[in-house]
Image: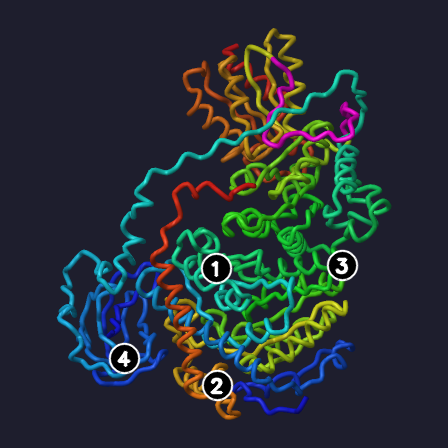
Amino acid sequence: MAPTKTASVSGRKPAARSATKTSSKPAKKDFNGGIFAEFNKDQELTAYRDMLLIRRFEEKAGQLYGMGFIGGFCHLYIGQEAVVVGMQMALKEGDQVITGYRDHGHMLATGMSARGVMAELTGRRGGYSKGKGGSMHMFSKEKQFYGGHGIVGAQVSLGTGLAFANKYRGNDNVSTAYFGDGAANQGQVYESFNMANLWKLPVVYVIENNRYAMGTSVARASAQTDFSQRGASFGIPGFQVDGMDVRAVKAAADEAVAHCRAGKGPIILEMLTYRYRGHSMSDPAKYRSKDEVQKMRSEHDPIEQVRARLLEKGWATEDELKAIDKDVRDIVADSADFAQADPEPDVSELYTDILL
Amino acid sequence: MPIDILMPALSPTMEEGTLSKWLKQEGDKVTSGDVIAEIETDKATMEVEAVDEGVIGKLLVPAGTENVKVNTKIAVLLAEGESADSIGSSAPAAPKADADTPAATSDAAGGKARQSAEEPTAASDSKVPAQPKLDVASDPDIPAGTEMVTMTVREALRDAMAEEMRRDEDVFVMGEEVAEYQGAYKITQGLLQEFGPRRVVDTPITEHGFAGVGVGAAMAGLKPIVEFMTFNFAMQAIDHIINSAAKTLYMSGGQMGAPIVFRGPNGAAARVAAQHSQDYAAWYSQIPGLKVVMPYTAADAKGLLKAAIRDPNPVIFLENEILYGHSFEVPKLDDFVLPIGKARIHKTGKDVTIVSWGIGMTYSVKAIAELEKEGIDVELIDLRTIRPMDLPTVIESVKKTGRLVTVEEGYPQSSVGTEIATRVMQQAFDYLDAPILTIAGKDVPMPYAANLEKLALPNVGEVVQAVKTVCYK
């Protein structure tokens, strides 16, 4: 473990967990702020590939949306890839994942197939929900992915319930409930925080602070803009993490998950991240400057950071990275082909899956 | 192969737009994410980003062109080593602005794109499939000689929960005051002592939150019984009941649902006024993915609550504070489970049918005794389950009697009674000898004053009068 300088997210407090602690006592000693392990070669390559898959998948989804294959709402995860990839690297079999409607990245990170996700986006029978859920409502029991929820904040109570089930069963699994800076102002979030710490439920609340709740900046919507502190009145420890650096995310996730597995109750990780694209496909994103977006892309891109390290350390050549890129593109292209060729659900599906 | 760049749709409803500006010119190198053009829609100016890497080979639609249909080829991107010459004659000219067929069928769009939202496809062309019929079992036979025990609805509900908790370790009860306090209405009396705090969970006063926690636990496979101190407070939780519990099975393509029971007293108690006196039967009965049960007798309360706990679907179980203390005969059987979705003929008769449920039955039972004295023989059906509704039993009765009155306490507009009336009118019109009358609460928030409260609720006299009216007596 060597102290490492990380790229801090521009315009914010310096990186990661050195920044803040809550008043909660156990938190301080649980987190060794500011220090995290460098990734080894395998971890860097895994992170690179997994993040790239999400990036390319989302770009393709945006393209298919533009072509009319994907309908309704489509919220892209581009820019935030390090959050879910870093978190997932810390989880083990049986740990649950639940999130809101910006969910394609989470699904791919849990190992759900690109074909199944893309075919759901196009509303086809081979989609994870047989085409009946769409972008915002997808699930995989096999991968312990519990959605995909279109109601802002609902996943926080539901994710707390998943943790309740872990505690009830006496296993050491952890529930990870992702939500944004917008959802963090919903009342049920605090109802859930209260119960989670009252009952010491194993849940990591991952607040993906991408600075904008649709078009409203954090500063315009939140009285307390340090979301890591949002659990303070319930005694839940919370930490800010550089959500653009997958290593910082993974390190924070390791500690948070260990905290939960040890029976110490919930924990909050505020991921300082950024979404490059609009809120949804139809958002022209006029509420922020192009320079702001460009600066994040050019200076803090989560994938470029890993790529630069891989090259610098000689762990991969340009050609090897190109090969990964091609591999990822092939997976995405295949998923897009499948999602366009796969038939729509049979009409008989209209009345199925309503009751068991 | 050169890659076609198409006019993108940037909202669910966009069909065309103005290509206002090119930000890249022929010969420019682009990588994915680069903004290549700006388009204007009726709502906003949007940027078009490149999805692939390459060199802009040709701009096919000049800047400033209006009414460019979605999916028209607007540019061609060349990969490394390709030249603009390789762009074949397949590149179309700028689209005709007046063309009213969407360009969605261009090759590059794979032959099927935005049209799927606009034109009926093969699938949506087909007829709407018939709603499947639900097969519901009949009530189990009660063996001759079975001892009948008199007990209150309260005791029956408690026994049902206790029996199911003994039977299945995954069943637990959560809610306000369910454990230490023994239940605000003493329905969970003794459960904490038998099952302990792990399975009998006192919650903070936080309906929205604990309903969500319950649904999350159910999605993970547990079988929660969520008690609402009253269903009035469940309005805080109704988002999770409907959006999270009722819809998940469908939205997940059948992968996961929520085996959960939401139960508690529903409707008016006495003198608790508007915010604490509301019948939610009609509200929940509208939601696909829910079952809604509303028992009257202690036997039904027990048998149906046991069924609700075993049911893999979310079940709304509407009790009533006034009925809690009513006593009924309950068969003494080891495992008395009744089918959800089956009405019970409380009394057979030949002149007129009354359909009622829950507390509505109390008015109906008194009314039929009075009517009997006047020589009117009423068939009284206790619906027991509001959703799925046992309409066949109602229709069979109406075929016999030709007359129908419904009785409930809820508001009159869009009530359960009006739903029954509509469906009977549609499915048994030729059998009706009189208009269907629906007795309900009055169209007012529940008043506090005793005299007004009495007026706001249905009464026996109204039921008697309605029956006489449909009998033309």
Marker disc for residue A307: 2
Whole-percent x, y for residue B414 in the image = 49, 35
Q: Secondary structure at mark 4?
A: loop
Q: Residue most toward the top?
A: B375
Question: What residue is shown with label 4?
Answer: B79
Q: Chain of mark 3?
A: A
Whether A199 is among the magenta residues is no
Q: Earlier in the sequence, mark 1 or mark 2?
A: 1
Q: Chain of mark 1?
A: A
Q: Nearer the viewer, mark 1 or mark 2?
A: 2
Q: Secondary structure at mark 2?
A: helix
Question: What residue is shown with label 1?
Answer: A136
Whole-percent x, y for residue B322 in the image = 72, 33
Q: Between marks 3 and 2, how big is the CA–CA gap?
A: 41 Å
Q: Earlier in the sequence, mark 3 or mark 1?
A: 1
Question: What residue is shown with label 3?
Answer: A170
Q: Which residues are magenta?
A: B326-348
Marker disc for residue A193: none
Whether B332 is among the magenta residues is yes
The three-letter code of the residue at mark 3 reads Gly
